[in-house]
Image (cartoon, grey):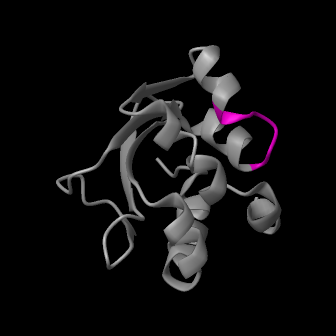
Amino acid sequence: MAFKSDVVFEEIKERIQTDKEMVKKVGTSFRMTIAGADGSTKVWTIDAKSDTPYVGDDASRPVEIEINIKDSDFIAIAAGKLKPDQAFMQGKMKLKGNIAKAMKLRTILDPKMLKAKL
């Protein structure tokens, strides 16, 4: 199954390679397990903590924050239609790790930067 969120992660990958200020501001690492409508899952790792920022499907990399979310809810967050804290409070996003650090996801998922891709 194709995940709609793939396009968002490709944009994040591009930005994390070029926007050193964003990487410095985020300074943490995430593993996101995205659930498709058919029950399939895809794992993305975002590392904005190491000297060499990384976005990809390497699930073995150590991370500080683990997030589980449906593909459709992730797209809603990326499009600015759903705030990450609302998704968490509504049970649409499961989180393991430091909540304050997890909120830095907002910096990565800037809807203004991603709108053209969605």
**Depth check: 118 or 67 in front?**
67
Taking 77 as reference, is 31 left or right?
left
Which of the two residues, 96 or 78, is positioned nearer the viewer here? 96
81 part of magenta stretch: yes
**The quadrant where residue 96 appears:** top left
* Image coordinates for residue 97, horizontal then vertical, percent: 35, 32
- Left or right: residue 93 versus residue 97 is right
**Residue pictured at 54% horizontal, 80% vertical:** 20
57 lies left or right of 81: left
Q: How many marks?
A: 0
Extreme residue in the top direction: 90
Reply above or below: 13 against 90. below
Q: Residue at x 40, y 55 (%)?
A: 28
Residue 106, x across and y down, in percent: 65, 48
Q: Magenta span covers which residues?
A: 79-84
Front-most of 49 and 71? 49
Residue sitting at x 82%, y 68%: 116
Left or right placement of residue 30 versus residue 25 in this view = left
Give the camera-side residue of 115 and 30. 30
At 58% from the left and 23% from the top, the residue drawn is 88
Q: Main secondary structure of the magenta part?
A: loop
Q: Residue furthest left?
A: 60
Residue 116 lies, with reference to residue 43, above or below; the image says below
Residue 78 location in percent, x, y?
A: 70, 49
Which residue, as the protein is rendered here, is positioned at the far bottom?
18
Q: For residue 103, what is the image quadrant?
A: top right
Quarter of the image that includes the C terminus: bottom right
Q: Per the image, is 35 magenta?
A: no
